[in-house]
Amino acid sequence: MNNINSVMKFHHIGIAVKDMARAKSFYAGLGYKFNRTFLDPLQKVIVALGTHTNAPTIELVSPGKGTSPIDAYLKKAGHYFYHICYSSSDIVKTLRYLQKQGHFICIVKPNVAVALGNKKVSFYFSETTGLIEILEEHSNK
């Protein structure tokens, strides 16, 4: 599977934050622009995507109501880089590639992500790479 770069591309870095307003202010000072903040009821998190002309896109994620997937990360630190997201134009090929690499465990099965245009995302963990998110480019509800 030498051709994975043709279907799997870097999308963003996920950053868990305790205080969304303070985090957005900090990153805005570095030149990031934020259009909208979303409540993701499935993940129970608040999400804001930040874009920059000369830096990677970031996704700030703070707890919503109830227990969220980022609670454990925030116990370690108040601000935590916790995942890298790749978009995929061929989810079957991408998942086959991850399986061939071995030791990838599906943490969250494909769910709709309101902050990412209602496209489906799923999360996978490996001790080698940590947590990665796969964004299905062509999925909608």
Image (cartoon, rainbow, N blue to C red):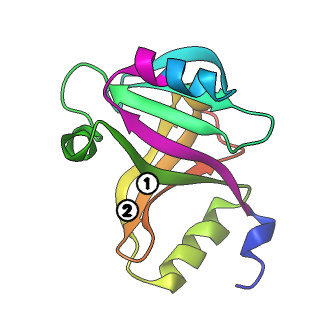
- The amino acid on which the numbered mark 1 sits, given as a three-letter code, is Phe
| Quadrant for the C terminus in the image | top right
Residue at x-position 36% and y-position 22%: 41
Residue 18 falls within the magenta-colored stretch = yes
Foreground pick, 67 / 97: 67
Foreground pick, 58 / 68: 58
Numbered mark located on residue 123 in the image: 1
Q: Which element is circle 2 on?
A: strand
- Magenta highlight range: 8-23
Q: Earlier in the sequence, mark 2 or mark 1?
A: 2
| Mark 2 and mark 1: Cα distance apart in space | 6 Å
Residue at x-position 57% and y-position 27%: 27
> Quarter-wise, where is residue 104 in the image?
bottom left
The residue wearing badge 2 is 106
Q: Are marks 2 and 1 in contact (CB under 8 Å)?
A: yes
Left/right of residue 17 with respect to residue 50 in the rendered view: left
Decide: few, some or many residues near mark 1? Use Cα within 10 Å; few <14, some 14-19, many ≥20: many
Q: Is residue 59 visible?
A: yes
